[in-house]
Amino acid sequence: MKQSIVTLDMEGVLTPEIWIAVAARTGLPELRRTTRDEPDYDKLMRYRLAILDREGITLSKIQEVIGGLAPLPGALEFLDDLRTRVPVLILSDTFEQFAQPLIRQLKWPALWCHRLVVANDRITGYQLRLPDQKRASVAALQGLNYQVLAAGDSFNDTAMLTQADHGFLLHAPAAIVKQFPQFPAFNDYAALAKAMLAKM
């Protein structure tokens, strides 16, 4: 039997949605739009960056908001328990410059994500680590002879879940659960952990 590895999305699965927190702090409801609403990631990011530019919101301001966030209740315990049994990798469409405060609180799990382009504290663009990085990362791990179990909550996770040997939804909105009935859907960590461990 193959060795297993788990890949998890970060925002919405282990941590709050960063952009929703930024929207709340800045009073800009249009920043509440996430990959749950807009499947086209490049379109979503260009939309966000235009708002940041228009409003003069700096990277420092966003990092200040992120610094006040904590992982979702139960996330650290879930991650700690899972990591005693199997390697865990976080595959996220967040950015290195955003994720660090939250990853620190999760005791530094491995994170593969993207990178922002910044000039004078203003976010001017972003660099994808790899196009379609979640699916590509899972395929690469399978090429290393791993069985991959993946969990996510958004449209941008569904390619990863489809590629994985076993895909699961966690904390996903009802519309996504309905659109992707092939993935077992859970709303608590204990049930997800039990389902994952049964496949190993």
Image: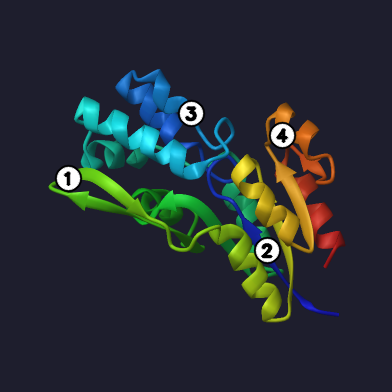
Q: Position of residue 70 (x, y in %)?
A: 46, 40
Q: Are marks 2 and 4 in contact (CB under 8 Å)?
A: no
Mark number displayed over residue 33: 3
> Dot 2: what SS?
strand
Q: Position of residue 200 (x, y in %)?
A: 82, 68
* Quadrant of the image occupied by residue 23: top left
Residue at x 55%, y 57% (from the top left corner): 132
Using the numbered discs, state the Cα–Cα distance from disc 3 to disc 2 in whole angstroms: 27 Å
The first of marks 3 and 2 along the sequence is 2
Kindly identify which residue carries mark 1: 121
Q: Is residue 114 left or right of residue 187?
A: left
Where 178 sits versus 143, above or below? above
The first of marks 2 and 4 along the sequence is 2
Mark number displayed over residue 196: none
Kindly identify which residue carries mark 4: 176
Q: Amino acid at mark 1?
A: Asp
Q: Are marks 1 and 2 in contact (CB under 8 Å)?
A: no
The residue mark sitting in front, 2 or 4, is: 4
> Dot 4: what SS?
helix
Kindly identify which residue carries mark 2: 6
The first of marks 3 and 1 along the sequence is 3
